[in-house]
Amino acid sequence: MARIAAIFHAPMGETASEQFVAGGRLAATTDLIHALRSWVDEILVVANDNEAALFRTLDVRLISSPLDVPFHFGRALQALAHDYKIEELLYFGSGSGGLLNQSSIESLIEFAEHCQRGALFNNFYSCDFAVVTSASSLLEARLPSNDNGLGFALSDAGIPCFSLPRSIETAFDIDTPTDLLLLRASDRGGKSLRRFLEASALPSYESVDELCGCLVDRNALVHLFGRINPTVWGQFEQQVACRTTGVIEGRGMRATGASHTYPHHDLLRGIGPAAFFDRLSEAVDAAILDTRPLLVEAGFLPPASDRFASDLLLDREIVDPDWKAFTRAAANASIPVLLGGHSLVSGGLYLLAEIAWKGRQLDRRLHPEPFFGRNGQT
């Protein structure tokens, strides 16, 4: 029975911010390949004709996708399942799984060995990586054009679906420049990723340090916005000293292909970005914003070049006028503002809670223990 790891590596554009993310994904994927090698029969890397050359030294089987044909995730995955007679599949999007430790990988392998037919997701609602057993069943499912909706598709096909516990290791994904800035501030990542981060001319982002100062301040109020899982929010709140407030909007935005806008988007459009951040600054001490549901327009987002420049507060590099104005207002806000995508308010929250305490002496046990009965057992 073939146990195959398949890593799908998406191409990036040529701007500095896009190449920064591309380099980080390549480094994290290199670490992942080394971590998986002893657990699987073969590692496949799916990349376009230009990107495939990056992996030639890593002893993997390269599956090159043509540049002149639009890429469809579902069809590509089904082709692998068919061509390689895969029964136990470990799927990873490039940039995901880079923080998995030995114990986490063992959990994936345990599922592959003991579940006869099923799928295990790092995030059922927005898949970054997954294990699929009896992978030939993929041939009968109607799979989506991107991996975010894989959980819904397999569930609809009658395949039993399971989810890993949420943690830094399972939730963190390199999706935007902000994710790499947070990794730079941490001690996490494999050898290739740490070398990349140390060698990169990373942009300065003072908001990360300033925001972390708020996270360990019992008197501070930090605003969260975006596609936040309530469990992640609850765990984040248990790890920081500050109070939190915020709004959950846009969950399943990519997985379900939702095209509508959201209430905060309408508020922003109504009063403009400068007034939006003025109001925010009057109410809270810092903000962590998943900007995609906030700025989505009729279901469409600008190219990654604009989104990533916005994450780095580089408004001069942004073409889209709405994103340019929003980014300029965020950079000029009187409070620290951290911008990013879904990964910022998923694995990024775990990482922020960890980074914030580096070098600080305040007791981390900031919340009382629960009381369950007469004998005071906890």
Image (cartoon, rainbow, N blue to C red):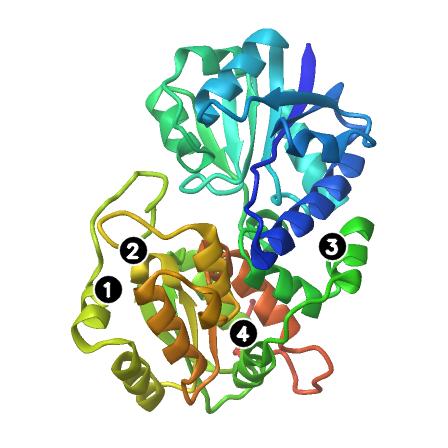
- Classify mark 1: residues with Cα within 10 Å, few (<14), some (14-19) or many (20+): some
* Residue at the (66%, 36%) spot, across then down: 107
* Residue at the (31%, 61%) spot, across then down: 295
* Residue at the (53%, 13%) spot, across then down: 79
87 relative to 231, above or below: above
**Viewer-proximal residue among 149 and 133:** 149
Q: Identify residue for label 3.
A: 189
Quarter assignment of residue 347:
bottom right
**Residue contact at pointers 2 and 4, CB within 8 angstroms:** no
Residue 307: where, in percent of width, then height? Answer: 44, 58
Residue 352: where, in percent of width, then height? Answer: 58, 69
Identify residue type, mark 2. Answer: Val
Which quarter of the rendered picture does the N terminus lie within? top right
**Viewer-proximal residue among 261 and 353:** 261
Residue 187: where, in percent of width, then height? Answer: 75, 64
Q: CA distance from mark 3 to mark 1?
A: 35 Å
- Classify mark 2: residues with Cα within 10 Å, few (<14), some (14-19) or many (20+): some
Tell us which disc is closer to us: 2 or 3.
Answer: 2
**Residue contact at pointers 3 and 4, CB within 8 angstroms:** no
Q: Identify residue for label 2.
A: 296
As drawn, is 369 to the left or to the right of 280? Answer: right
